[in-house]
Amino acid sequence: MQQSRRDFAKKTAIVTAGAAVAAGTSVLAATGNSSYQDDSNNGVVKGNSRKKEILYKKTATWEEYYKNAK
């Protein structure tokens, strides 16, 4: 009785590990990702948002900061 439980647990662990590896491999294959990074975009992710990105807005506070920083 004890031996059959151990065999069952061992087989279950092997099947679970195999399924996890197969699932991970299929996800990588489906997305086209690999362990090597594509250097063509230098790590920049390009999105398709409709919002305009504002990086700098000219204000009196920023002008004072830049004047003092020089």
Image: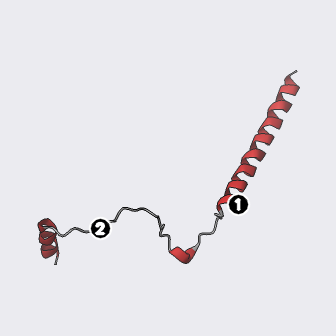
User: Residue 55: image x %, image y %?
Assistant: 29, 67
Q: Amino acid type of disc 1?
A: Ala
Q: Tell me the quarter of the picture where residue 50 sits.
A: bottom left
Q: Considering depth in this image, is 60 or 70 the residue closer to the camera?
A: 60
Amino acid under disc 2: Leu
> In this rendering, is residue 20 above or below 60?
above
> Is residue 3 found left or right of 51 in the rendered image?
right
Along the line of sight, the residue nearer the viewer: 17 or 61: 61
* Res 17 → quadrant: top right
* Residue situated furthest top in the rendering: 1
Residue 47 locus on image (x, y percent): 47, 64
x, y percentage for residue 41? 52, 74
Front-lying residue, 21 or 30? 30
Q: Residue at x 59, y 72 (%)?
A: 38
Quadrant of the snapshot with the N terminus: top right
Residue 13 sits in which quadrant? top right
Label 2 sits on residue: 55
**Mark 1 to mark 2 CA distance (whole Å):** 37 Å
Q: Is residue 13 above or below residue 49?
A: above
Where the C terminus falls, by quadrant?
bottom left
Circle 1 — which element?
helix
Q: Who is closer to the viewer here, 31 or 42?
A: 31
Name the secondary structure under disc 2.
loop
Dot 1 or dot 2: first in sequence order is 1
Q: Residue at x 80, y 41 (%)?
A: 15
Q: Residues within 10 Å of mark 1 (few under 14, many from 20)?
A: few
- Which residue is painted at 72% across and 46% down in the image? 20
Rendered image: mark on residue 29: 1
Q: What is the residue that sits farthest to the front in this orientation?
A: 50
Q: Residues within 10 Å of mark 2 (few under 14, many from 20)?
A: few
